[in-house]
Image (cartoon, grey):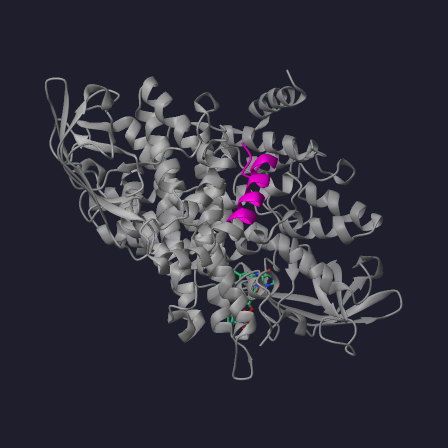
């Protein structure tokens, strides 16, 4: 496989860049934040995105998707990262559709995937329970009942939780906390009795919530796959998620960098543009080098998903670790090189720093993935 | 079977039959690389055999045209050849400045006569070249060089001094930047000339490096002679050629950043042990190793991506400008880690326990990677100006 985008992907990139800059830009994010209506994305814009097929981009054609694969989805996610576009592209498409395809049975796929692809259904994944991302630490309990299951526990960091019609809930049906065996996945409607969703106001102004499951009864057909055996498929979903968020971090970092370079060419101090100071030039050039590496590894990782590589975990952790590192530097340098104006709420560059930290955390940060990368490398 | 499959099959058979066993082992050190020349340094007699056999097929430089001694292979065939050589662990038969630097410049800027005179001996490893660029007062600011060439009717007379001339004491010929005009800007009036090192007007004095070896020299020209036919390009147009050649030099040097090495993590576990979960005990070292491995992976992917972009007709993108800088910094990091992991055993300078200082000498030599061929700072200047469009001070 060659490490370049093909025609179809290049066209997708063009159209995503154009659409998002117009309809789901940083200005829209700011307006939605200031309006504070809680949805935090524009449902009409989301319908338009779904209308272009983006909600079903990686969903197989058999389930009503476009079947463009994850490289295609990654291209759109990168552009969404550049524009800080608020939409359920992450929650419903990258996370939930991937999980349903990997974990669900035929009936569940038929019920949910075409609806997600069409933008009619919004599903989210409920995974994290504490302040830290720790999948084997899943502790939300699932106990078998006469004709179904009872779920109890709390999930945090659930994206678009208030808008979701259903959740893919990862629960522990057996085994001890910390073990990967004994994890089960359920599809739970958001209006099931005992489900309470509360909003969390996060630094990136995106929609996010805590979902509490109190004695929630679901029928047997809510179980996805075999009880207690979700892990291998779940692990692949988590790897895909890490790569998808890396693509967003890539777009975000590139945009923050380009805005900063534009500022360096224009802002004057000491009678000359600040971009002529070598102290800034070398930092910019070194960051440019890191961004080029980031581009390569993200593309390689997206292609690895589509090619079905068996060492996906290694490349996924490498990619998320690298992108967390690069995005941290890119967003920090962006604020620093803007000087005082970079610290103001009115100026946009700070929004990139805010979103960067959330994306870095989601589905494993630098330390989590660097540690995993080393373990997978045998040390 | 496609033509390429046939080619692979034949290549595999030929390599099996012709690559001497001793040439199927990794190169141990710089001294173990075969560079050819009139007075070749031969670490193992099979180096000569292997070079001759490969040269006969044009495979010392497989991608150069056949009429100049190359193999005339397309990029797909070159790749197959490289893969098949890697398969049996075959070394490159010949590595030289002629191949990596002068050749590409001559192919682009040389006239027919110059190509026919100089390229075939490079392919056969008969002539070894050195690079006369840097001078005591012209390093990063190369264009301020002062070595003069004066027109003497049927030849040029060269006077001046070069420094850091790698292998000047061993090379047969030099490609040299000289000033032929002092009237214009410093970039004008530079000419690119070739001449023999084996003549009374040339003296090369080896300089010892911190690593203990003496690969480079101070080189003095005292009425040295360059033949008129050996002026490459037009008089005063040498700067363009010099820069083009530098891009090839940098490409070669950046390759150090992708050299396959043993796993640092496993080597570190041998020294420090692992905990119950298999993690290296020294967590700080572990993080640095992982970050190094991660960057190496991403750097390789970038080389691959840029190569694929060129192949797919997108041209050489700006990413290529980071290779020299990033590759050499990576190689320095690997060497730092080698020293840290090795501990006392990595610090010995001579003696069998220390493998005659192999680890620490390689570490010391690696410091030059970010200096030779244009320093890291100069590379960053180039990225800032040419790629990012940031203005001059
Ligand atoms: C192992 C080795 C082999 C070599 N082989 C050869 C050879 O075969 N032929 C040959 O011609 N040369 C050779 N060189 C020379 C090499 O090209 C020069 O050393 C190099 O270009 C730097 O020049 P300099 O040594 O004069 O350092 P200087 O230019 O004096 O640099 C000193 C420091 O100042 C920094 N600096 C200089 N200018 C700037 C600037 N504008 N902005 C920011 N920082 C700056 C440099 O980055 C460096 O850190 C070799 C060098 C080494 C180390």
Front position in the image: A338 or A379: A338
Instruction: Answer above or below: position of A231 versus A78.
Output: above
> Farthest residue in the bottom direction?
A270
Q: Magenta segment, which residues?
A: A1-20
Front position in the image: B156 or B268: B268
> Farthest residue in the right direction?
B153
Main SS, magenta residues? helix
Q: Residue at x 53, y 41 (%)?
A: B304
Q: Residue at x 72, y 71 (%)?
A: B187
The number of discs equals 0
Image coordinates of residue A121 in percent, x first then y, are: 37, 33
Image coordinates of residue B322 in percent, x first then y, are: 53, 55
Residue B345 visible from this viewpoint: no
Image coordinates of residue B300 in percent, x first then y, are: 48, 44
Quarter holding the C terminus of chain B?
A: bottom right
Asked if the stretch drawn in magenta spans residue A5, the answer is: yes
Front position in the image: A276 or A269: A269
Q: Quadrant of ligand 1?
A: bottom right
Instruction: Answer above or below: position of A108 versus B244.
Output: above
> Farthest residue in the top direction?
B1
Image coordinates of residue B352 in percent, x first then y, are: 33, 47
Residue A299 appears left or right of B140 = left
Residue A369 appears left or right of B94 = left
Front position in the image: A266 or A38: A38
Quarter holding the N terminus of chain B?
A: top right
Q: Residue at x 22, y 23 (%)?
A: A229
Residue A178 visible from this viewpoint: yes
Asked if the stretch drawn in magenta spans residue A101, the answer is: no
Instruction: Answer above or below: position of A69 versus B118.
Output: above
Q: Residue at x 66, y 74 (%)?
A: B144
Residue B153 appears left or right of A288 = right
């Amino acid at each position: 496989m060659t490490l370049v985008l093909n025609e179809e992907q290049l066209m997708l990139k063009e159209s995503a860049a154009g659409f998002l800059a117009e309809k789901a830009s940083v200005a829209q994010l700011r307006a939605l934040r200031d309006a504070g209506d809680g949805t935090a994305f524009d449902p009409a814009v989301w319908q338009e995105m779904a209308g272009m097929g983006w909600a079903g981009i990686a969903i197989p054609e058999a389930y009503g998707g476009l079947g463009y694969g994850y490289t295609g989805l990654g291209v759109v996610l990168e552009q969404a990262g550049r524009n800080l576009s608020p939409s359920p592209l992450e929650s419903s498409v990258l996370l939930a559709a991937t999980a349903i395809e990997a974990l669900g049975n035929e009936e569940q796929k038929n019920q949910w995937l075409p609806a997600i692809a069409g933008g009619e259904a919004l599903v989210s994944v409920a995974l994290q329970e504490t302040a830290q991302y720790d999948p084997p630490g899943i502790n939300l309990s699932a106990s078998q009942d006469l004709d179904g299951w009872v779920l109890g526990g709390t999930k945090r960091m659930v994206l678009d939780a208030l808008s979701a019609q259903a959740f893919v809930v990862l629960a522990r049906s057996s085994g001890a906390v910390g073990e990967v065996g004994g994890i089960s996945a359920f599809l739970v409607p958001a209006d099931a009795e005992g489900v309470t969703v509360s909003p969390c106001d996060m630094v990136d102004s995106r929609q996010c919530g805590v979902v509490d499951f109190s004695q929630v009864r679901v029928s047997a057909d809510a179980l996805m796959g075999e009880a207690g055996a979700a892990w291998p498929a779940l692990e692949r979903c988590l790897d895909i998620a890490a790569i998808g968020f890396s693509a967003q971090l890539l777009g975000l970092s590139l945009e923050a960098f380009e805005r900063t370079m534009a500022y360096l060419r224009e802002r004057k101090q000491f009678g000359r543009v600040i971009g002529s100071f070598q102290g800034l030039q070398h930092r910019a050039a070194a960051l440019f080098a890191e961004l080029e590496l980031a581009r390569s590894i993200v593309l390689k990782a997206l292609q690895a998903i589509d090619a079905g590589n068996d060492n996906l975990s290694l490349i996924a952790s490498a990619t998320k670790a690298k992108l967390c590192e690069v995005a941290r530097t890119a967003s920090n340098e962006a604020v620093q090189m803007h000087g005082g104006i970079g610290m103001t709420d009115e100026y946009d560059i700070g929004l990139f720093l805010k979103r960067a930290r959330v994306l870095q955390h989601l589905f494993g940060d630098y330390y989590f993935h660097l540690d995993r990368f080393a373990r997978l490398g045998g040390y | 079977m496609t033509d390429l499959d046939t080619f692979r099959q034949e290549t595999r058979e030929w390599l099996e039959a012709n690559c001497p066993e001793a040439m199927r082992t990794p190169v141990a050190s710089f001294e173990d690389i075969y560079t050819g020349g009139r007075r070749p340094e031969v670490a193992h007699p099979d180096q000569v055999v292997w070079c001759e056999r490969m040269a006969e097929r044009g495979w010392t430089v497989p991608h150069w045209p056949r009429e100049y001694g190359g193999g005339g292979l397309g990029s797909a065939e070159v790749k197959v050849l490289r893969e098949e050589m890697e398969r049996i662990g075959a070394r490159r038969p010949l590595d030289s400045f002629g191949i990596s630097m002068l050749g590409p410049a001559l192919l682009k800027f040389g006239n027919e006569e110059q190509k026919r005179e100089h390229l075939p001996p490079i392919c056969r490893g008969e002539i070894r070249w050195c690079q006369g660029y840097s001078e005591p007062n012209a390093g990063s600011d190369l264009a301020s060089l002062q070595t003069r060439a004066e027109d003497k009717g049927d030849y040029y007379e060269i006077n001046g001094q070069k420094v850091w001339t790698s292998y000047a004491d061993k090379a047969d010929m030099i490609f040299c930047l000289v000033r032929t005009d002092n009237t214009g800007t410093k970039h004008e009036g530079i000419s690119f000339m070739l001449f023999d090192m084996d003549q009374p007007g040339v003296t090369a004095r080896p300089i010892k490096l911190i690593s203990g070896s003496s690969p480079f020299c101070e080189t003095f020209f005292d009425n040295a002679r360059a033949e008129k036919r050996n002026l490459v390009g037009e008089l005063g147009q040498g700067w363009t050629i010099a820069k083009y050649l530098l891009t090839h030099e940098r490409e070669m040097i950046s390759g150090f950043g992708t050299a396959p090495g043993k796993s640092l993590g496993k080597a570190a576990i041998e020294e420090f042990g692992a905990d119950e979960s298999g993690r290296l005990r020294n967590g700080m070292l572990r993080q640095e190793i992982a970050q190094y491995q991660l960057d190496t992976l991403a750097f390789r992917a970038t080389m691959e991506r840029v190569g694929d972009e060129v192949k797919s007709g997108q041209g050489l993108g700006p990413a290529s400008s980071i290779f020299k800088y990033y590759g050499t910094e990576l190689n320095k990091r690997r060497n730092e880690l080698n020293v840290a992991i090795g501990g006392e055993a990595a610090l010995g300078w001579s003696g069998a326990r220390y493998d005659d200082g192999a680890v620490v000498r390689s570490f010391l030599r690696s410091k030059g990677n970010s200096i030779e061929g244009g320093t890291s700072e100069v590379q960053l200047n180039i990225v800032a100006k040419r790629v990012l469009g940031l203005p001059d001070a």
